[in-house]
Image (tube, rainbow, N blue to C red):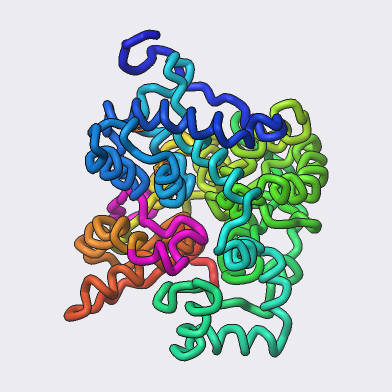
């Protein structure tokens, strides 16, 4: 086996072999964890990324042999529980990823372990299944009258304490409000514009709304539409849409991911083949279509077609600018923006496109924080992880607040709310006056377009 550190070749990612019965072989998975943990023990680069590595290294350092062989195998699951599949260790740190012969893919090994845990069933399965059913929750919670009750309940300390006891959702964690004015049924139809194809960008856009924008913060979707309209880019809203599957993937529930994929991919593939660029305003959903589904279904040509057509909104807009087809007639400065790049944006490997776009706005100062906020989808609201989520995010809260911003902004709106909560806790004596605004909303404001 090669002892060479790193690889001169570009990293590759092996497909997720989830339909092979051996994927669920517990002995083989434990053996692979032992092999990879041993490599990590000798490396330790990832110690500051999340809590999975500190937990692993503590187990090793407290073992009688001071090596992985001294750690009882049943304790490996404590490492698995701390991983929220952000992918940052693979994409930004690890020198031993394929094609290096050591073939380390830490996140997908954790995914395999989570898939085994999910099949076996866990004591928190009821809570986890409910939290990850974003589409179903959205449909139920946004029914008129129900929505007022759900939102009021989320603000009542006694109800939150009950929710923590019964459901394991930390009573202090920020949770999103729901709206009865969902995005998709209320989205303005596109005007008729000439389709202007660019060298890098398709001239027409399909919007995959996402559960969060559809049920929780539709304003982000309406702002995206206004930006497209201002730039005379015709768009369609994808009519039949289910959750992208990321919350189920993070749970290891791969059968549910496959069911959601079966709903989403046919209409998306049709639009991709018709020449649309597909935009998703939430980075985790974009990543699901760009990376995880293509690795779960490597031989599905429709999944691959969707992957090729899928864009982060700012990846699309900045490419459009490079094509000479984006207006930069910004009329409103944004002042000081403290911008956070979420992990699921970083690992898309498209560069800092949101920052590039915000920096096009005159008299706007953008400070960028590229570090995990700790929110991590549904992970950070769970009772057993919420305190750790705040601990992981502390350097982010501090750096973003130190910039004394007018706006706090993250491509992941859930992370932005988590950051706001962290800053409030950090600065109890001197509350921040910064407002939270999604980068899409900031660009709509910069164009001077009405709310
Ligand atoms: S995928 Fe993210 S959470 Fe999981 S071990 Fe790597 S850095 Fe930590
Ligand atoms: S995942 Fe890679 S970089 Fe991180 S500790 Fe393990 S071997 Fe080192």
Give percent across and percent down for residue 140. Answer: 72, 76
The residue lying toward the viewer, choosing from 111 and 285, is: 111
Ligand 2 picture quarter: top left
Where's residue 144, x and y in %? 72, 86
Q: From the viewer's perspective, is 403 left or right of 121?
A: left
The residue that appears at 56% across and 63% down in the rendered structure is 123
- Does the rendering let one see residue 446? no
Magenta region: 359-387
- Residue 371 in magenta? yes
The total number of labels drawn is 0
| Quarter placement of the C terminus | bottom right
Location of residue 435 with respect to 19 vertically, above or below: below
Asked if residue 214 is among those painted magenta in the image, a careful observer would answer no
- Which quarter of the rendering shows the N terminus? top left
> For residue 5, what is the image quadrant?
top left
Relative to the observer, which residue lies in front, 261 or 235?
261
Is 119 on the left-hand or right-hand side of 404? right
Q: Is residue 52 left or right of residue 98?
A: left
Judged by its main secondary structure, the magenta piece is: loop
Rendered view: 144 above or below 238: below
Residue placed at 46% from the left, 34% from the top?
349
Query: Which residue lies at the image location 55% right of the left edge and 74% below the top edge?
Result: 167
Q: Is residue 333 above or below residue 65?
A: below
- Location of residue 357 in the rendering, given as x and y in whole percent from the top left corner: 43, 48
Q: Percent x, y for residue 365?
A: 28, 55
Decide: is 94 above or below 234: above
Name the residue rendered at 67%, 34% in the picture. Answer: 18
């Amino acid at each position: 086996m090669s002892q060479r550190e790193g690889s001169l070749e570009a990293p590759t990612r092996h497909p997720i072999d989830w339909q092979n019965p051996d994927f669920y072989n517990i002995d083989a998975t434990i053996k692979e964890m032992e092999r990879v943990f041993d490599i990590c023990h000798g490396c330790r680069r990832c110690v500051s990324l999340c809590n999975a590595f500190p937990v692993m290294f503590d187990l090793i350092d407290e073992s009688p042999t001071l090596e992985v062989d001294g750690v009882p195998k049943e304790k490996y699951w404590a490492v698995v529980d701390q991983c929220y599949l952000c992918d940052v260790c693979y994409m930004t740190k690890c020198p031993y990823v394929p094609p290096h012969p050591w073939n380390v893919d830490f996140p997908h090994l954790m995914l395999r372990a989570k898939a085994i845990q999910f099949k076996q069933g866990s004591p928190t399965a009821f809570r986890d299944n409910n939290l990850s059913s974003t589409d179903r929750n959205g449909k139920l919670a946004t029914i008129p009258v129900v929505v007022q009750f759900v939102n009021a309940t989320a603000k009542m300390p006694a109800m939150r304490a009950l929710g923590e006891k019964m459901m394991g959702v930390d009573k202090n964690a920020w949770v999103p409000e729901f709206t009865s004015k969902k995005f998709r049924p209320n989205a303005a139809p596109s005007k008729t514009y000439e389709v202007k194809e660019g060298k890098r960008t398709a001239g027409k856009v399909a919007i995959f709304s996402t559960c969060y924008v559809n049920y929780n913060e539709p304003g982000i979707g309406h702002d995206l539409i206004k930006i497209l309209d201002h730039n005379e880019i015709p768009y369609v809203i994808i009519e039949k849409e289910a959750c992208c599957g990321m919350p189920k993937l993070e749970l290891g529930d791969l059968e549910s991911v496959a069911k959601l994929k079966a709903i989403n991919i046919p209409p998306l593939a049709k639009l991709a083949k018709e020449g649309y660029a597909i935009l998703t305003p939430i980075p985790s959903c974009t990543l699901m279509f760009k990376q995880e589904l293509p690795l779960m279904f490597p031989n599905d040509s429709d999944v691959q077609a969707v992957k090729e057509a899928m864009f982060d909104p700012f990846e699309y807009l900045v490419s459009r600018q490079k094509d000479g087809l984006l207006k930069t007639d910004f009329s409103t400065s944004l002042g000081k923006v403290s911008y956070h790049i979420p992990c699921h944006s970083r690992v898309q490997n498209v560069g800092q496109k949101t920052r590039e776009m915000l920096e096009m706005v005159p008299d706007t100062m953008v400070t960028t924080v590229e570090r995990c906020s700790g929110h991590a989808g549904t992970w950070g609201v769970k009772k057993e992880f919420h305190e750790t989520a705040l601990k992981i995010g502390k350097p982010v809260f501090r750096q973003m607040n130190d910039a004394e911003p007018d706006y706090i902004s993250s491509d992941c709106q859930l992370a932005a709310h988590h950051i706001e909560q962290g800053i409030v806790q950090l600065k109890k004596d001197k509350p921040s006056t910064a407002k939270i605004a999604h980068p899409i909303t900031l660009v709509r404001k910069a164009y001077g377009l009405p709310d």
